[in-house]
C-alpha cells in the first residue's frame, strides 16, 4: 500500500462500506472512462426524499475505491437535500485530508456518479412531466427556492442572494443537449461540474435534471421547423415557455419548495406580471412573456434589483470563481453561432427563386432556410441600392427582396397570447429583441388572434418573433405572443 495514503483512506480500502449494486434501485449513475481505468457506479434507493440505501462499485485506482466508500457512508440515511450538499471539501475531510497529488480526480468522479444516480431517480419519478410539460401539482410547498444554475455569474449570484436573504435554496442545472466537453455551452459536462462545485462552495445542494428529450422536441425541432416554414424563431422564448421554468417547478414540488428562481434581469409586479429591471440595458422581459401566470406567481428574480456591474462586484466580493466568466451571446445549442449550418444538417433544402415585390425573378437561392425577414447579407445579388429580404415563401420556394423602406410595417397580427393583465391596458409593443416599444392600439380579430396597430412604422418585423405588450407606464408587461403576419405600409387590411 503506498505510504502516501493516510490511515482513513487505508481503512476504507481494507473495509469498504456499501460495496455492490442494488437489484432494484430508484436511481443509477456512472462516471469515468474505462479507457483511462477509473469507473464508478452508484445505485440508490430513495423514498420520501430520504436516501435509504446506497451501493457503489469502483474500478480503478485505490483513491476511487476509498472515496466511493466514504461518500456512500456519508449520504446513506440522509435527506436528499443533505446528500446533494456533500462537497468535494467535505468528502476530502472524511478521507482524512488531501489525497496524493494526481489522485484528486477521485473526488470529482465519485460525486459525479452519485449525482447522476440522483438525477436518474428524479427523472424516473417526474419523467412524464419533464417530457410532456408541467401542468402544476397544486402543492403549495414551503418557503424554499429551486434556483436554476447555468454555470455563469448571473445564476450563481441569484442563488447566493437568495441564501443571504434567508431562503432555503437548492440549485439545479439542466442537461438540455449534448454540449461538447470543454465548451462554454451551458450543457457541456465541464459546465455541469463547474456549476455543482460553485453551488457546493456556497453550501447549497445541487441537482441535475435531464431535459434533453423535452428540449429537443419543444426548442430544437421548433427552431429548425420555423426556418423551414419561413419564420424566425427565438429559442430562448421557446425554452422559457416549455422547459426551464416548468422543470424548476417540478423539482420544487418534489422537494416541497414553493419558489423557483432564475438569473434573468426582470421583476415580478402585482398581477402577477413582469416588470422591467433596474438595469434596463439587461432587460429580459421580452423573452419571459410566455411564462405561465401561475408559474410567474412562484418565481423570484433577485437580479431585477441590481445592475450587471453590481452583480459582478458581488461575485468578486464573495470570492466566487464565476465573477470573471464572459458573457454568453450565442444560442446555447449552436455555440459557433452558425445557425444556417445547424439547420441545413437537419433539413433537405430545395433551391428556388429570388424575386422582387412584383414577382420578377432576380436570381436563384439554395434554400429558404437560409433567409429571414430583414436580412441584407448573403442574398447573392448585386444591385445599385441595398436589397433586403422582405418575405420568405416556403410554399413556392420564393425569397422576396426589396428596399429597406419595404420592411416598414404599421400592423402586426399576433397569436399564441399569454396575458398577465387585461389587453386594454396595452399601450405599446416591442416586436424585436433589441428594439424599443412603439405606441400602439391592440384589438382582437375575428380569428381569435390580435392585431397591433402601430403609431409609427417599424422595420424588420419577422413572423415567428415575439410581440410583447407593455402598459402605459412602459414598465409592466401586459402580455405577449408570436408574430403571425406583418402588413407593410399601405398593405394592411383596409389600408
Image (cartoon, grey):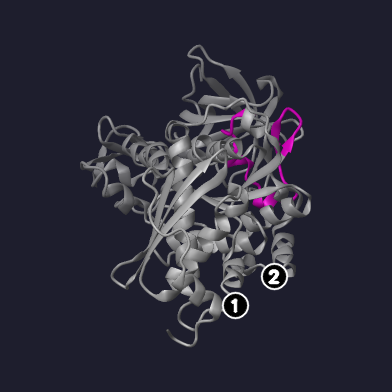
User: As displayed, is residue 145 above or below residue 191?
Assistant: above
Check residue 97 in the rendering and tell me which mark sits there, or answer none. 1
Q: Which image quarter: residue 6?
A: bottom right
Residue 392 is situated, as x and y percent measured from the top left of the image, at: 35, 36
Residue farthest to the bottom, as pictured: 3
Tell me the residue that label 2 is attached to.
319
Q: In the image, 256: left or right of 213?
A: right
User: As displayed, is residue 175 above or below residue 440?
Assistant: below
* 290 drawn magenta: yes
Image: magenta residue range? 268-293
Report how many numbered discs are placed on residues in the image: 2
Residue 330 is situated, as x and y percent measured from the top left of the image, at: 47, 56
What SS does tag 1 mark? loop
Residue depicted at x 51% and y 15%: 448
Residue 462 visible in image: no
Residue 212 is situated, as x and y percent measured from the top left of the image, at: 40, 45
Of the image marks 1 and 2, the number of the one nearer the N terminus? 1
Residue farthest to the front, as pictured: 15
The CA span between labels 1 and 2 is 23 Å
Q: Which image quarter: residue 463?
A: top left
Q: In front here: 418 or 255?
A: 255
* 219 drawn magenta: no
Amino acid at each position: 500500500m503506498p505510504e502516501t495514503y493516510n490511515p482513513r483512506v487505508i481503512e476504507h480500502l481494507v473495509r469498504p462500506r456499501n460495496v455492490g449494486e442494488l437489484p432494484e434501485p430508484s436511481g443509477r449513475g456512472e462516471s469515468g472512462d474505462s479507457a483511462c481505468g477509473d469507473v464508478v457506479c452508484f445505485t440508490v434507493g430513495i423514498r420520501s426524499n430520504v436516501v435509504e440505501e446506497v451501493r457503489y462499485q469502483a474500478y480503478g485506482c485505490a483513491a476511487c475505491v476509498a472515496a466511493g466508500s466514504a461518500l456512500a457512508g456519508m449520504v446513506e440515511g440522509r435527506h436528499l437535500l443533505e446528500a446533494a450538499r456533500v462537497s468535494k471539501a467535505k468528502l476530502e475531510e472524511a478521507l482524512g485530508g488531501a489525497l496524493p497529488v494526481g489522485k484528486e480526480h477521485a473526488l470529482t468522479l465519485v460525486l459525479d456518479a452519485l449525482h447522476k444516480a440522483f438525477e436518474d431517480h428524479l427523472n424516473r419519478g417526474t419523467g412524464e412531466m419533464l417530457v410532456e410539460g408541467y401542468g402544476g401539482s397544486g402543492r403549495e410547498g414551503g418557503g424554499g427556492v429551486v434556483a436554476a444554475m447555468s454555470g455563469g455569474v448571473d445564476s450563481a449570484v441569484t442563488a447566493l442572494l437568495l441564501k443571504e436573504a434567508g431562503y432555503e435554496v437548492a440549485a439545479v442545472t439542466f442537461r438540455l443537449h449534448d454540449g461538447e466537453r470543454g465548451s462554454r455551452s451551458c450543457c457541456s459536462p465541464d459546465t455541469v461540474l463547474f456549476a455543482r462545485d460553485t453551488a457546493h462552495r456556497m453550501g447549497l445542494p445541487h441537482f441535475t435534471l435531464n431535459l434533453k428529450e423535452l428540449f429537443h422536441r419543444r426548442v430544437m425541432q421548433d427552431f429548425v421547423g420555423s426556418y423551414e416554414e419561413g419564420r424566425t424563431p427565438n429559442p430562448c422564448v421557446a425554452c422559457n415557455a416549455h422547459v426551464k421554468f416548468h422543470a424548476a417547478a417540478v423539482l420544487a414540488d418534489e422537494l416541497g419548495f414553493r419558489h423557483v428562481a432564475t438569473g434573468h434581469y426582470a421583476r415580478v409586479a402585482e398581477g402577477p406580471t413582469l416588470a422591467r429591471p433596474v438595469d434596463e440595458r439587461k432587460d429580459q422581459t421580452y423573452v419571459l412573456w410566455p411564462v405561465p401566470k401561475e408559474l410567474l406567481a412562484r418565481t423570484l428574480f433577485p437580479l431585477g434589483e441590481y445592475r450587471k456591474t453590481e452583480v459582478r462586484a458581488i461575485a468578486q466580493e464573495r470570492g466566487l470563481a464565476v465573477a470573471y466568466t464572459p458573457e454568453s451571446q450565442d444560442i446555447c445549442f449552436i455555440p459557433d453561432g452558425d445557425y444556417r449550418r445547424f439547420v441545413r444538417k437537419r433539413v433537405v433544402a430545395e433551391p428556388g427563386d429570388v424575386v422582387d415585390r412584383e414577382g420578377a425573378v432576380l436570381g436563384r437561392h439554395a434554400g429558404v432556410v437560409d433567409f429571414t425577414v430583414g436580412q441584407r447579407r448573403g442574398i447573392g445579388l448585386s444591385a445599385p441600392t441595398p436589397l433586403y429580404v422582405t418575405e420568405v415563401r416556403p410554399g413556392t420556394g420564393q425569397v422576396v427582396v426589396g428596399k429597406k423602406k419595404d420592411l416598414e410595417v404599421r400592423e402586426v397580427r399576433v397569436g399564441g397570447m399569454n396575458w398577465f393583465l387585461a389587453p386594454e391596458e396595452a399601450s405599446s409593443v416591442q416586436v424585436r429583441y433589441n428594439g424599443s416599444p412603439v405606441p400602439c392600439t391592440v384589438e382582437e380579430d375575428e380569428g381569435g388572434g390580435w392585431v397591433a396597430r402601430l403609431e409609427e412604422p417599424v422595420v424588420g418585423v419577422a413572423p415567428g418573433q415575439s410581440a410583447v405588450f407593455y402598459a402605459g407606464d412602459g414598465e409592466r408587461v401586459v402580455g405577449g405572443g408570436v408574430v403571425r403576419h406583418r402588413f407593410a405600409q399601405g398593405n394592411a387590411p383596409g389600408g
